[in-house]
Amino acid sequence: MKSTMKIAAAVMTAALALGVASQASAMSFDLNNGYSSSQAVGGKDHYILQVQSPTRIEVASQAFIPTETAHIHVRAVLRDDNGSLVTMASRQGNNFVLDRQVQPGTYTLEVESWNTSAKQQGANRYQLHADF
C-alpha cells in the first residue's frame, strides 16, 4: 500500500512538473507589420496585436526547414482580449494564412508549431509576415 502511494505521488509530481515546463515554453512577442523574427519550431508562441481602428489583419507563416518539408506544421488562432476565439487561420500546406477584419482592441495570435519527424529536431524555424 505504501509503495502504491509513493508511486502515485511520484506520478502526480512528474505530471505537475511537466505541465509547468510546457507552460513556461510559450513565448510572447509583439506582432508588427512586416516580417517577425524567426522562432524555433515546437510549442506555442503568442503574438500581441494592438489595433487602434477597424483593420483588416493578414498574417501568413513560412516554415524554414533544412530538409523534410512535409514534417513541419504551423497553425494559428486569433483571440480577443477576453481570450475568446475570433478566428482560426486557414491551412496552406504546412503553413497558415489568416485574413480577418477586426475592431479596435488587443488581440493575441496563438501560433502552434510542431515537427512530426525526429530528424532535424531543433533546427527548424518559422517566421510570420503580417500586414495590418
Image (spheres, rainbow, N blue to C red):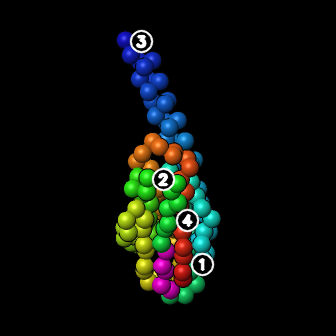
Q: Nearer the viewer, mark 3 or mark 4?
A: 4
Gap in Å between the C-alphas at discs 4 and 2? 17 Å
Identified at 43% across, 57% down, the residue is 69
Q: Quadrant of the N terminus?
A: top left
The secondary element bearing badge 1 is classed as loop
- Give the magenta part as a residue range: 55-59
User: Residue 88: x percent and y percent?
Assistant: 38, 69
Q: Kindly identify which residue carries mark 4.
A: 127
Mark 1 crowdedness (10 Å alpha carbons): few <14, some 14-19, many ≥20: few
* Labels 1 & 3 near each other (Cβ < 8 A): no
Q: Kindly identify which residue carries mark 1.
A: 33
User: Residue 37: x percent and y percent?
Assistant: 63, 65
Gap in Å between the C-alphas at discs 1 and 2? 29 Å
Is residue 87 shown above or below 22? Answer: below
Q: Any magenta on residue 130?
A: no
Is residue 59 shown above or below 93? Answer: below
The secondary element bearing badge 4 is classed as strand
Residue type at numbered disc 3: Lys
Residue type at numbered disc 4: Gln
The secondary element bearing badge 3 is classed as helix
Q: Kindly identify which residue carries mark 2.
A: 67
Gap in Å between the C-alphas at discs 2 and 3? 51 Å
The answer to whether residue 73 of the structure is visible from this angle is: yes
Mark 2 crowdedness (10 Å alpha carbons): few <14, some 14-19, many ≥20: few
